[in-house]
């Protein structure tokens, strides 16, 4: 099931996308595999807190966020991973851990590892652990308006 908020937003903006239904998965790399998308093209969303406020960090599935580099890139605020209990209620139309990387739909900023910007298209969770979406990176950037950063490193 697509997040209704995301589905409505994409339809209102006439955004071209492809739905990628897949077997139930929990990790970004497993989702990329199940959806037949290269792991470098699958954008995983990591929930963080920047000076105590929720934000999204989006990066290629095989990478992990470097909180120290992220803090430096943002000018020095305290940056830490958010616990699921801290963000679960922020996404009422999504399964926990399957939120799409459209933070503005949920009142939070989105930071994206710029390596994703080099991809012609990306895929990402669409609100459930059984659905992903694929769209051009340019369209994603136009709609999500993320702040591009070079942060993550291979796990």
Image (cartoon, helix red, strand yellow):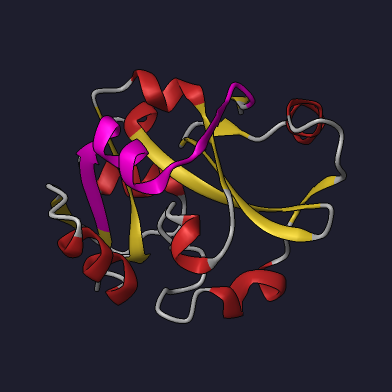
Asked whether the viewer can see residue 37, the reply is: no
Residue at the spot 57% in from the left edge and 74% down from the top edge: 90
The image shows residue 40, relative to residue 110, as above or below, that is above
Magenta stretch in the rendered image: 132-151
Asked whether the viewer can see residue 46, the reply is: yes
Say left or right for 98 vs 134.
right
Compare residues 80 and 51 and report the one nearer the observer: 51
Q: Position of residue 26 (x, y in %)?
A: 44, 59
The image shows residue 117, relative to residue 18, as above or below, that is above
The image shows residue 89, relative to residue 78, as above or below, that is below
Which picture quadrant has residue 86? bottom right
Judge whether residue 149 is colored magenta: yes
Which picture quadrant has residue 139? top left
Say left or right for 155 vs 95.
right
Q: Position of residue 122 (x, y in %)?
A: 29, 36
Name the image quarter holding the N terminus.
Answer: bottom left
Compare residues 130 and 46 and report the one nearer the observer: 46
Name the image quarter holding the C terminus.
Answer: top right
Judge whether residue 116 is colored magenta: no
Q: Position of residue 110 (x, y in %)?
A: 54, 46
Q: Position of residue 16 (x, y in %)?
A: 12, 47
Say left or right for 65 vs 10.
right
Residue at the spot 48% in from the left edge and 40% down from the top edge: 146
């Amino acid at each position: 099931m697509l997040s209704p908020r995301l589905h409505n937003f994409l339809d209102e903006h006439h955004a071209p996308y492809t739905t990628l239904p897949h077997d139930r998965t929990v990790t970004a790399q497993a989702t990329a595999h199940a959806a037949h998308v290269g792991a470098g093209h699958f954008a995983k969303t990591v929930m963080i807190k920047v000076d105590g406020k929720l934000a999204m960090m989006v990066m290629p599935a095989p990478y992990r966020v470097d909180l120290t580099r992220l803090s430096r890139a943002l000018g020095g605020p305290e940056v830490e991973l958010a616990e699921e209990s801290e963000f679960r209620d922020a996404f009422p139309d999504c399964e926990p851990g399957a939120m799409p990387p459209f933070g503005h739909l949920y009142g939070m900023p989105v930071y994206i590892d710029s390596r994703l910007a080099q991809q012609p298209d990306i895929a990402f969770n669409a609100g459930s652990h059984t659905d992903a979406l694929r769209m051009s990176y340019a369209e994603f950037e136009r709609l999500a308006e993320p702040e591009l950063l070079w942060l993550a490193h291979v796990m």
